[in-house]
Image (spheres, coloured by chain):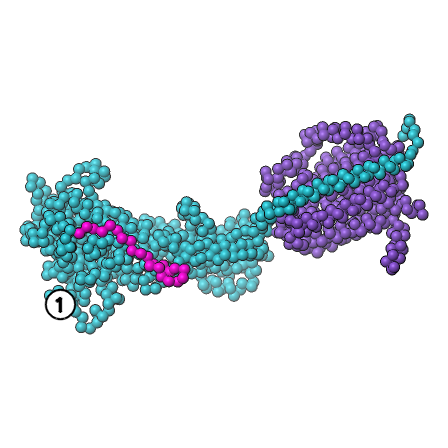
Chain colours: A cyan, B purple
């Protein structure tokens, strides 16, 4: 390339120029490196803690560990709900050389169905290859053993254990004890509302019914944590720290499983319920509702077929009849109505009427009939209770009026929740003028009061309400919430008894009136014409009680109720409430038998079976040779 | 006594084989640091180390061979190397293999070849050859032509697209022009024009993925799981290393695989995490030593061509260091530039050591002649 303006090359000047430029370049290099260093100082020194935190946040994951659920015992230490390991066959895909072959071999060995393999492949999708996936859950012990002996042939396949609830008494305790089942969306929402999602982070099951649900907070325990180091794919590299969970508290129930079993045996196929409670504390010794079902079905997820069978059964096994069944109390409330009569001076113990079997009101054409067509003749209050005279109580109710009855019976807890430690409770109905106006927009008629006088009409009660009211009667107005929970084992292993929950006591006008009524109930069992005298003949203890026969079917005026002609579901409910021993009550018993007929003939004998069962267990000496009989004592 | 005699003997020996001992030692230390870090970053995989050692061996071989070539031979070759390089770059754009979403490779049947790597040396050779034909400092027409020589391959490589390499090639040429003594007035004007060129580059030259890198660089937290992930994890690795580092093989960000491209482009983050600021300062001292030594050799070089080529090679080496550290620590956008002689990988290693071979050739030439 020709260059016009030729200059003589000055090598020294060029070298100097280059040297200057090189020095400048060197300085720039130094400056830029200083910039890099200052940025690194900013990152590594000034913001070190910030980045250290973020680095740890990357690698350290906190995994929750589920606490073991507290166990449930009966009052004598019999295990009612336990935690058993359930085994599942799990596969870690990345550890398996040939998944297809492994699955084929496992199918042959374990009898795994094509459906199970299909489900397995389904859950395999979108799953990290190092995370275990279950091929079969709830292995039998035989299956566990069969696999265990050949496990070396299946790398990446293992048997994993998890604790799951098991109820050894199955259907005997279902309604009282309840069950746990997998946490669903609704449960999760409640957990979140309670701010407990952290505590339930690893929990699989939650109480769904009964005690398991009501005392969930005691039974659940506190979640534990495992600090692990994970890599960027989430694979656990090692465990850094473990904070063990605090297991849930073991609880003890007032229930005596032997009495519970006795109640179940007594009821057999009879729809109904039996409650035995401790007379002085309200503690529930037995509460059986028939028919029942096996709660273990629910623990691992009940099949929809089984569930709809339970749900749609006309016998309604899912209902806890003891607390949710609403029955007309019938004659079982006559003693309480009599008590009100005495306390309000409406009647005196001596006051008597002559029962002709019919009751009429002035200017009313309707005739109210006694259950005994020809009447009971002259009856005072005690006799009226003893023979369950309807006419006496028609008149008494008429005299007292609905307002007085409704107020007083509400004090005994009718028409309200007893507060038993079950969420499955209904309040039934104690009718009043205001209630009828609100419900039907109708005035209260005098006939409504007459029906209430014999525990019929609009009045419904739950069996637990009857037990509760009977306890209030024998305790002279003191009232406690009936409780299934007796206490729980504290952190130090000692029993923490659940305190009694007192309710507003009933005001006593005259204690003698209460004795009169208790005596009347004594006569029902022990009197010469007592409604329950045959059922309780020759008991080695003295009890008191009251029968009831609740009509579900209105017999038209002038007609007679004929059991055979009435549809089975409309037949009378047989009822009985009672307590024993009479002079120092220990237990209260309520029996309700749906569509079983008369109370004295059907319910009273069953109540006796329960009382016998109780005393045989707790006072066996009564049944020893040379026993005293009820008859002898009462003479 | 023994030591000094050894040394006297060796000086003549190293000069005779055209090897600059201080530079060689600096490079070897760097390679050692690289192997140690790759071992940690690659999950203690010895196979990785073996492959890197083989590459280093080849690269050192290339360096030693090129050091024997007299600088004047390179000078004569400059124009042919450059011309062939441009042709190959065009060929790559037309016939090139696509690897990792970019056309960089030229398959000549017996060898797969990355022409852009060769241009890293051919461009400074060409610019040095052209500028040194005239007296220094260069005048405007020479500067314009010099820039043209730089811009053409830069654009061709940016088109592949390979922003990192085009950046390195542009700087290598520009350094030659700067070192030749381009006037400060012109430098200011060119810098201004360059500023004006940036928007043009953004709208017409840059690919979407390159733009994304720049956007991510501006605000990595805007996409912490996507494009910003690399930078965020890299900064966490560096920052959590602190002053003393977590210790060799103890870097959780790298060992637990949170850090991407651990043993290649982001190896500096691994090093910073495990050896902390202390280690980084020592590493920077080695780099600075090599750069200063390179500039010394350039200053001492016999003629303008040698000076410009040696200076350009040295400063381009610095650009590697600066751009890599800058991108890994979040002050520069992520462009694919390895940490020289430390990152795992072959192609750039060979080019780098070839450059150092030329540098050593230049550096040892004078003394040999003056003897």
Question: To which residue does mark 1 refer?
Answer: A632
Give the magenta range.
Answer: A487-508
* Residue at image location 44% in from the left, 54% down from the top: A222
Please give the chain letter of the residue carrying mark 1. A
Give the percent coordinates (x, y) of residue B13: 89, 53
Left or right of A82 on screen, residue A362: left
Of residues A87 and A569, which is closer to you in this image? A87
Of residues A306 and B113, which is closer to you in this image? B113
Of residues B351 and A633, which is closer to you in this image? A633
Give the percent coordinates (x, y) of residue A97: 59, 57
Q: Does the rendering let one see residue A315?
A: no
Left or right of A279 on screen, residue A55: right
Label 1 Cα crowd, 10 Å radius (few <14 / some 14-19 / many 20+): few
User: Which quadrant would the N terminus of chain B be assigned to in this image?
Assistant: bottom right
Give the percent coordinates (x, y) of residue A453: 15, 47
- As drawn, the residue found furthest toward the top would be A4
Asked if the stretch drawn in magenta spans residue A492, the answer is: yes
* Residue at image location 43% in from the left, 49% down from the top: A196
């Amino acid at each position: 390339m020709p260059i016009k303006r030729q200059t003589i090359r000055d090598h020294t000047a060029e070298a100097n120029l280059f040297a200057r430029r090189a020095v400048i370049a060197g300085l720039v290099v130094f400056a830029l490196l200083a910039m890099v260093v200052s940025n690194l100082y900013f990152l590594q020194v000034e913001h070190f803690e910030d980045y250290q935190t973020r680095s740890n946040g990357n690698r350290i994951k906190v995994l929750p560990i589920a606490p073991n659920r507290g166990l449930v015992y009966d009052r004598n230490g019999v295990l009612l709900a336990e935690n058993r390991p359930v085994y599942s066959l799990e596969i870690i895909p990345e550890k398996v050389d040939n998944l297809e072959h492994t699955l084929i071999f496992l199918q042959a060995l374990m009898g795994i169905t094509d459906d199970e393999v299909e489900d397995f492949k389904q859950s395999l999708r979108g799953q990290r290859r190092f995370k275990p996936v279950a091929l079969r859950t709830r292995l039998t012990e035989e299956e566990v053993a069969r696999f265990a002996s050949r496990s070396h042939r299946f790398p990446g396949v293992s048997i994993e254990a998890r604790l799951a609830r098991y109820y050894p008494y199955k259907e005997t305790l279902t309604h009282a004890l309840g069950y746990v089942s997998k946490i669903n969306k609704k449960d999760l929402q409640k957990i979140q509302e309670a701010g407990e999602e952290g505590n339930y982070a690893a929990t699989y099951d939650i109480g769904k019914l009964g005690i398991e649900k009501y005392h969930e907070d005691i039974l659940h325990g506190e979640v534990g944590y495992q600090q692990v180091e994970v890599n960027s794919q989430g694979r656990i590299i090692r465990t850094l720290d473990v904070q063990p969970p605090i297991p849930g508290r073991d609880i003890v129930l007032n229930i005596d499983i032997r009495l519970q079993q006795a109640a179940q045996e007594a009821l057999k196929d009879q729809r109904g319920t039996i409650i035995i409670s401790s007379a002085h504390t309200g503690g529930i010794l037995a509460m059986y509702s028939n028919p029942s079902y096996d709660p273990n079905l629910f623990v691992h997820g009940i099949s929809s077929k089984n569930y709809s069978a339970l749900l749609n059964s006309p016998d309604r096994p899912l209902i806890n009849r003891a607390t949710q069944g609403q029955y007309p109390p019938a004659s079982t409330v006559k003693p309480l109505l009599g008590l009100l009569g005495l306390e309000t001076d409406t009647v005196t113990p001596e006051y008597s009427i002559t029962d002709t079997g019919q009751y009429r009101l002035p200017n009313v054409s309707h005739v109210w009939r006694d259950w005994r067509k020809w009447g009971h003749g002259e009856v005072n209050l005690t006799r009226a209770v003893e023979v369950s005279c309807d006419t006496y109580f028609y008149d008494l109710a008429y005299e007292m009026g609905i307002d007085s009855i409704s107020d007083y019976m509400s004090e005994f807890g009718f028409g309200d929740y007893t507060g038993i430690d079950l969420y499955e409770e209904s309040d039934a109905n104690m009718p009043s003028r205001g209630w009828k106006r609100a419900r039907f927009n109708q005035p209260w008629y005098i006939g409504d009061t007459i029906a209430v006088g014999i525990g019929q009409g609009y009045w419904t009660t739950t069996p637990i309400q009857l037990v509760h009211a009977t306890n209030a009667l024998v305790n002279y107005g003191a009232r406690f919430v009936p409780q299934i929970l007796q206490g729980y084992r504290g952190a130090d292993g000692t029993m923490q008894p659940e305190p009694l929950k007192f309710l507003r006591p009933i005001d006593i006008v005259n204690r003698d009136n209460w004795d009169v009524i208790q005596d009347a109930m004594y006569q029902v069992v022990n009197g010469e014409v007592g409604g329950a005298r045959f059922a309780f003949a020759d008991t080695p203890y003295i009890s008191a009680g009251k029968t009831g026969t609740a009509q579900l079917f209105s017999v038209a005026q002038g007609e007679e109720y004929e059991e055979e002609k009435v549809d089975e579901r409309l037949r009378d409910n047989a009822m009985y409430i009672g307590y024993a021993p009479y002079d120092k009550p220990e237990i209260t018993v309520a029996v309700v038998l749906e569509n079983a007929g008369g109370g004295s003939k059907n319910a009273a004998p069953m109540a006796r079976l329960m009382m016998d069962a109780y005393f045989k267990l707790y006072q066996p000496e009564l049944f020893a040779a040379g026993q005293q009989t009820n008859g002898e004592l009462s003479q | 006594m023994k030591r000094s005699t050894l040394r006297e003997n060796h000086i003549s020996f190293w000069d005779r084989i055209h090897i600059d001992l201080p530079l060689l030692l600096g490079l070897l230390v760097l390679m050692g640091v690289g192997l140690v870090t790759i071992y940690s970053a690659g999950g203690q995989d010895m196979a990785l180390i073996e492959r890197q050692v083989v590459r280093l061996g080849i690269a050192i071989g290339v360096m030693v061979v090129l050091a024997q070539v007299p600088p004047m031979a390179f000078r004569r070759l400059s124009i042919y190397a450059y011309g062939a390089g441009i042709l190959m770059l065009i060929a790559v754009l037309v016939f090139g293999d696509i690897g990792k979403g970019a056309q960089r490779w030229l398959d000549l049947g017996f060898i797969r070849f990355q022409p852009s790597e060769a241009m890293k040396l051919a461009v400074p050779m060409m610019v040095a050859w052209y500028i040194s034909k005239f007296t220094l400092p260069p005048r405007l027409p020479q500067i314009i032509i010099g820039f043209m020589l730089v811009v053409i391959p830069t654009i061709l490589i940016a088109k592949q697209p390979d922003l990192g390499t085009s950046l390195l090639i542009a700087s290598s040429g520009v350094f030659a022009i700067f070192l030749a003594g381009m006037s400060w007035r012109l430098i200011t004007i060119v810098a201004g024009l360059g500023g004006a060129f940036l928007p043009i580059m953004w709208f017409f030259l840059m690919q979407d993925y390159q733009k994304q890198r720049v956007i991510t660089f501006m605000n990595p937290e805007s996409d912490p799981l996507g494009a910003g992930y690399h930078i965020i994890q890299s900064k966490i690795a560096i920052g959590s290393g602190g002053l003393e580092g977590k210790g060799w093989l103890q870097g959780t960000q790298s060992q637990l695989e949170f850090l991407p491209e651990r043993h290649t482009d982001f190896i500096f983050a691994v090093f910073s995490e495990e050896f902390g600021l202390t280690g980084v300062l020592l590493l920077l001292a080695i780099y600075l030593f090599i750069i200063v030594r390179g500039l010394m050799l350039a200053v001492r070089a016999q003629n303008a061509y040698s000076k410009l080529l040696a200076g350009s090679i040295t400063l381009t080496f610095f650009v590697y260091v600066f751009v890599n550290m800058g991108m890994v620590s979040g002050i520069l956008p992520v462009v694919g530039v390895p940490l020289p002689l430390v990152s795992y990988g072959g192609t750039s290693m060979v080019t780098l050591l070839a450059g150092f071979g030329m540098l050593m050739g230049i550096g040892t030439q004078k003394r040999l002649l003056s003897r």
